[in-house]
Structure formats: C-alpha cells, structure tokens
Image: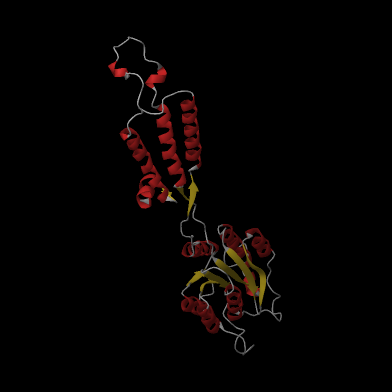
Amino acid sequence: MNGWLAERFGFVLLEPRFLWFVLAVPLALLARRLTPPPSLAFAPERLLPPLGLPVSLRQRLRALPLGMFATGIVLLALALARPAERVALPRQSLGVDLMLAVDRSSSMNEFDLDGERTRIEVVKDAATRFLEGRSGDRIGMLAFARYPDLLSAPTLRIETLIERLAELETVVVDGPEDLTGIGGAAARAAEILRRAPGSSRVLILLSDGEENVAGAHAPQALGPAEAAELCRAWGIRVHAIAAGAGTDAARSGLEVLAARTGGSFHHAADAGALDRIYRAIGEMEPSPLAEPEVRLRERGGWLAALSILLVAAGAFLARRGWEAGP
C-alpha cells in the first residue's frame, strides 16, 4: 500500500494497521440500522394523517450528529495511521580530498609562460582561480624545492589557501634548497591524503623541472616511481603538470606519477594552457554527491484535531436534542 501511496500521492502511512478501525464505522452503522427501535407509546408518525406542519431544520439534519461521530472516528483512524509526506532533501556534495603541490625552485622565476610574469606568478594566479571554483572540497597545499613544505593542511576554508598561495616565493638561486624533489613532494602529499576521510583523493602536482634530489644528492630519498607506488597503494590519483615552454624533456618523472596512479599528465607551455589544464582537471574530478535522502514529515496532526472537533460537535448537538441517527 505504501508503495502505491508514495507513487500516487507522495506520502506513506507509518502505522497502517490503524486503518482497520475505519471498518468499525460502517459496521456500527449497519448494526444500528438492524437494531429495532424501542417501542413507542403512541402511533408512529407515518400512521398519522399529515398535518401540514413545516419540517424543522433539526428534523432535516437529524443524522448530522451521527455523521459527525462517524467522520470523526474515520479521521482519528487516519491520524493514528500517521500519514507522512516524503520530502526529498537536496543532494549534498561529499567533496574531494585534494592536495596542491607547487614547485618553488628558482627556475620558477622564468618569464616564458606569458612574457610579463614569472612562472610562479602565473601558476599562483591560475591556482587561485582553480581554488575559487572548488567550494565544498577539502584542499591542502604544499610547496617544494629540495624539501616539501606544508603550507596548509586540508581545509574547507578556500580563503586561507588563497592567502597562503599569495605568500609563496621561490627559494634562493643556487642555494642549498634549490633542487627539485618531485618524489618527496608526492610522497609527503600522499601521506597527508591517506588520512583524509573521503573516498576521492587527488594530488595535483606542478613542476617545471625533472627530479634531481633522489639519487646522487640523496640516495635514500624517494623518486617519482616510488612515490607513485605509494599513491597507488593509498588510492590517490595524481594529475601532473609540467609548466614552462622548455620543459618537454624534463617531464618523465611527472609522467610516471600520472600514469601509475590513474591520473593525467599535462604540459602547460603558456598561461592560457595552464588555465585550460586546471579547468580540465576540475572537470575530471567533480565533487561526488551523496545518495538522495528523503525525510518523512508527519501530516496527521490536523486530522487528529479535526476528528476531535467533529466528535465534540456531534456530542454537543446530541445533548441539545438533535437526533443521533435515522
């Protein structure tokens, strides 16, 4: 029954067993009709000659109290059955757990992406626009050169991320940190994402160079291939971006990260391409939605109130001398 009611009228009965009380009404009326009336000490009205007297309103509506009683009982049974409207709730975004990893080695000061701004400035502007379109996602951010530095743990406060991004600067040219540790950055981001509560974990890693930390400089450091295995084991997709017009040859580590984790690799040769890449990644990683939820809003209160009103009114009329039945 509830399936039919929900399909046709959009509501269900939480306690449908109380509808059996509705059957008591016709049974009571039938029993009343079959019960012989009490003996009268005078002749019935139908044997008396017509007197031509007008029929009063009370006589015309003599069945009204009984009708009120019967209707009140039916409405009370419906109220006890607890009719509830099925109200569909808006689907909620579950969000994506996402990390941005941005290269800040000194080579990010090149002017080859648009001629007027450095690579790091172009990247910061493009990443800011990307963040502004990701409300509802938990996003963290780190910057890396030789070592990865966490700028922000995953948060829903996009404005905090944008502030941290605006403060990002490159390392000192030829200083002790002026190397490119892609594997270390990916591994650090994966370590943070693996603790994220959601089921969709994504790393967007941007660099303009090739891995040059793991190996000669630090044999114990993780390279892109090892970091890719960590990401894959922890269910993290990596979208890798090689930024810069002259980075065609320096991208094998980025391609490994993307290929082994089910992500994507992109090459941004100019500022416009970088914007398009961020939009494409955004389309590839839509925020998942929770399953539609339905809330039951009970609507039986007015039925109960109306049933009480009808029964009380019927009792009042009966006490005032109105007939209670045919």
Relative to 61, residue 248 above or below = below
x and y percentages locating residue 218 in the rendered image: 64, 88
Number of marks in the rendered image:
0
Q: Nearer the viewer, residue 175 or 33?
A: 33
Q: Nearer the viewer, residue 215 or 139?
A: 139
Residue at the spot x=39%, y=49% of the render? 6
Relative to 323, residue 89 above or below = below
x and y percentages locating residue 259 in the rendered image: 46, 77
x and y percentages locating residue 247 in the rendered image: 54, 75
Q: Nearer the viewer, residue 212 or 7?
A: 7
x and y percentages locating residue 70 in the rendered image: 40, 35
Residue at the spot x=46%, y=23% of the render? 321
Which residue is situated farthest in the front direction here? 41
Determine whether, in the image, residue 119 is placed left or right of residue 262: right
Q: Nearer the viewer, residue 240 or 246?
A: 240
Relative to 160, residue 187 above or below = below
Residue at the spot x=41%, y=35% of the render? 71
Specify the quadrant that holds the C terminus.
Answer: top left
